[in-house]
Amino acid sequence: MRRIKLARINPETVVREIGDFIVKETVEEGRIGGVIGLSGGVDSTTSAALAKKAFDRYNSGNPEVPLELVGYLLPSKLNQKADEDDGRKVAERLGIRYELINIEPLVEAKSRVQPRVMASQFNKGNQISELRAGVLHGQAALENKILIGTGNKDEDFGVGYYTLFGDGAVRVSPIGLLPKRLVRQMAEYLGFSDLAQRVSSPGLEPGQTAFKDLGYQYEKVVELYGNGIEQGFTSEELMEHPQLISEAEINIAEYKEAFGRSKFNSVGELLRDIQRRNNSARGKARVLSPPMAKITLEYE
């Protein structure tokens, strides 16, 4: 069976391509910059660093209206203080203006208005994501800026692990075509090696991580599945592909070691879950799909 190819990048080229995209979308909208939610995670950090570089390069040409990036930290009771501290440090290292807005009063108000919805931890998490999006959209409108998204390819288009009208409701998606593996590479290139390998978490439930929720890592099993679809493999072929089977076995073993139990009883069960989520992700993309930066990917 033929190999599923993984992409590689030239980080310098990708910085330029994504930066040009962000500036083009901002200027064509008649905006004066962008706002971004900062969590201290690798996705938001990388997206913010790319936007800051792009705006700095644009501003070096002495435009009539310079572009500004503003970061927003939006904690609730569910967030760890360390996440807030990391987000603040990212903003300070980038040298951007930032603001902390505690959204817990909004969460409490939502709980009073829709107590049955907020009683479910899953629904509550999605509602909190939507509340954050509402705050960011409001700030973007107030400041005449675009809302910059932070979702990566594996997360948004591989398994749809995002809230459609929450973190998915953005004006532009700079890293939407970068798999998580390459987002981490970009973070290192941009000077954030200390955050590049940070554990992925949406921060919507206590102790939540993407690995714990999904039962597998974005790297490489989700990336391989998504690339396989793009490269013309059928779903049936992917269920039996040795690359995917090998990575699934690794994920099952790592999950059991990390959490003391198994989430999936077999490789087939894990791969079918990715297949199900991938189908759902494509459905979500048909409802809401912000423009993404076209980047140069080389496959090996």
Image (tube, grey):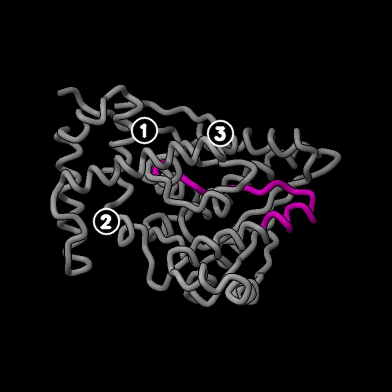
- Quarter assignment of residue 243: top left
Q: Which residue is depicted at the point 57% across and 45% down?
A: 50
> Which residue type carries mark 3?
Ala
Q: Which residue is mark 2?
A: 215
Q: Quadrant of the N terminus?
A: top left
* Residue 290 location (% of width, % of height): 59, 38
Residue 40's place in the image compared with 279, above or below, is below
Image check: 209 left or right of 269? right
* Residue 75 location (% of width, % of height): 57, 71
Q: What span is colored magenta in the figure?
A: 136-154
Mark 2, Cα crowd under 10 Å, few <14 / some 14-19 / many 20+, is many
33 or 151, nearer to the observer: 151
Image check: 102 left or right of 201? right
* Residue 42 location (% of width, % of height): 46, 55
Q: Is residue 43 visible?
A: yes
Q: Which residue is mark 3?
A: 293
Give yes or no for residue 265 being in the magenta stretch: no
Which mark is first along the chain, 3 or 1?
1
Q: Which residue is depicted at the point 64% across and 38% down?
A: 22
Residue 58's place in the image compared with 73, above or below, is above
> Which residue type carries mark 1?
Arg
Q: Which residue is mark 1?
A: 8
155 or 20, nearer to the observer: 155
> Which residue type carries mark 2?
Gly
